[in-house]
Image (spheres, rainbow, N blue to C red):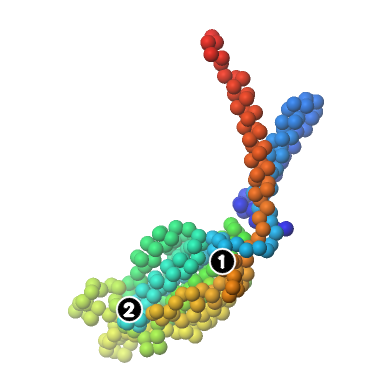
Amino acid sequence: MTLQPILPWWLLAPAVALAILFLGWRVFRSARDRSSGPLREWLFRSALVLLIIAAALRPGFPGGSAQGASSDLNVFFVVDTTTSIVAEDYGNGSPRLDGVRQDIMAIAAALPGARFSVLTFDSNAVVRMPLTTDTTALETMVSVLEPQVTAYSKGSSVTIAGELLAERLKAARAGHPERPRLVYYLGDGEQTSGKPPEALKVDGGLVDGGAVLGFGTQEGGRMKDPGQRPGGDVRGNGYVQDRSSGGARDAVSIIDEGRLRGIAAGLGVPYVHRSAGDLVAAMMQQADPGDLQRSPDDTGLGGRTELYWIFALAAFLLGLRETSLLVRQWRRLRPQEGART
């Protein structure tokens, strides 16, 4: 038998201890007074509270099948918002960011009921959206994602979000250790900080599944400058300029799949290159956490046999008894019709 309490242990344990101490004290007082009526009532109330506590602990046996197990997932999207994410080599000259947006929403549609969070990184890493089941908020957040303005960029590292991601994963595990945590890293692997990227600081056991999704081509693509208006100005043609050779020419961003595979190895998830038109189903099969793998002829997910409902039902019946007693006492205390005030 296993327990999956509805609240974290650090919050549930003190509340249970206080309830048991109070009920024990009341039963002891009633027994010492040798009054069978109050003692019987406090024994019933103690049983009611203990049944509620047992239901809150969610006892169960591993095994069985749970069709809605995706509702027990915490999903973290780590999104590259450096200028290179708008390089125009996705599909028919579209920016990579279009593919990022499409894949995020496709993953959300494939995991109904899951909780989603969005972290972005460029020169800094930021939590754009905390964990939520609101896919409308997720869609709104994804639709307004824009790259960092080139003029403000001081170079970016592909692993700058590692520390922030580790913090959010640890918080999710502490709050709900029973929920698997999936991480989807979406980027092109281009390192522009001038220093080799540091390893992602994510402890083992924090990531249960996910994938690193790579966007871009070896031929590369030009990048619209987020700091310029469409049509360009006297400084250029609206694209980021490369002046490293002394002249000015359109800069080209090229995917670095070697770095992306290294990030995937650090997270313990597969690397998948994404191109326009690629279906999300094949990628999702690779990205499922091990304990939620589906077999070809099984549409269910690994689950458990819940027992909390037995205790909840018994508590409900005792609660009905307590309610009827309260209603009876209220009727006795209510002034009779015509009685003087």
Q: Residue furthest front?
A: 297
Q: Amino acid at mark 2?
A: Ser
Q: Position of residue 330 (x, y in %)?
A: 59, 24
How many numbered marks does the figure carry? 2
Left or right, 132 with reference to 173: left
The secondary element bearing badge 1 is classed as strand
* In this view, 296 is above or below 310: below
Q: Quadrant of the N terminus?
A: bottom right
The residue sitting at 32% across, 82% down in the picture is 92
Q: Residues within 10 Å of mark 2 (few under 14, many from 20)?
A: some
Q: Nearer the viewer, residue 224 or 301?
A: 301
Residue placed most toward the observer, 136 or 285:
285
Residue drawn 66% across the image and 63% down it: 64
Q: Which mark is residue 181?
A: 1
Which quadrant would residue 208 be assigned to in this image?
bottom right
Nearest to the observer: residue 19 or residue 314: 314
Q: Residue 165 location, x and y as percent?
A: 52, 67
